[in-house]
Structure formats: C-alpha cells, structure tokens
Amino acid sequence: DTQFIEFDKPILLMKGLKVVKRNILKFYKTVAEELIWLSLNYENKQISVDEASLKDKILKVISKYTDEDNVSLELFKLTAKYDLTTNQHVSAKNFFNMEERKEK
C-alpha cells in the first residue's frame, strides 16, 4: 500500500517563511521559491521522485530564467515590502511615497 501525498494548498506550507526581502530583484524571489520546492522534491502539487542531483536541479531552474530570449524585465525590477515588524517608525503612507519617488 503505497500512498502519495497530495497538497491542495501548498502555500500553507510556507507560512512564516520570508522569501521576499526588501529591495531585492523579483528574479531572486522567483528562483528562490522554485528552488525551495525543488529541494523538497515537490512539483505540480505532488511529491516527485526525480533522480537528478540537487546541483542539476539548481542549474535547470537558473537557466530556465536566464536562457530565454525574451526575459521579462519585471523580474529584474527592485521590490519592496512594507513590514510592520521592521519598519516600526515609518507609516504606510510615507512608505508608499518613498516607493513612488523611487519609480520616478
């Protein structure tokens, strides 16, 4: 009796895991999330059995986003995250205004 675990809502498993840091490229966030799931052998809402080494998986993910001819420039745009635990002295309004000035 082999049972396969299926996850309907995999985002619940990442609760508390901060992948997005302030002012990093979206590229890093995207690659990091995919690497986390691959390192757990998790693909398409199922645990996968892949014989490839971790190094091969990492190279595959990175090349997926860098070898394309028309890479989205959005991936290389700086991101920001308003976090009350780290930005206690900055109001949400001031944070928004700072981000708006960066874009100009």
Image (cartoon, grey):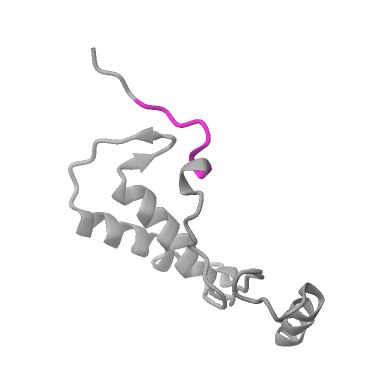
Name the foreground residue: 31 vs 73: 31
Residue 14 part of the magenta-drawn span: no
Q: Is residue 102 left or right of residue 25?
A: right
Q: Is residue 104 above or below residue 35?
A: below
> Percent position (x, y) of residue 101?
76, 87
Q: Is residue 73 left or right of residue 59?
A: right
Magenta region, main secondary structure? loop
Q: Is residue 9 above or below residue 68?
A: above
> Percent position (x, y) of residue 75?
54, 69
- Residue 69 can be seen in this image: no
Residue name at image x 36 percent, y 64 percent: 62
- The quadrant the C terminus occupies is bottom right
Name the foreground residue: 53 vs 20: 20
Residue name at image x 30 percent, y 57 percent: 60
> Percent position (x, y) of residue 16?
50, 54
Residue name at image x 39 percent, y 66 percent: 67
> Percent position (x, y) of residue 96?
77, 76
What's drawn in magenta, residue-wise? 5-11
Residue 6 part of the magenta-drawn span: yes
- Residue 21 can be seen in this image: yes
Q: Is residue 34 above or below residue 92?
A: above
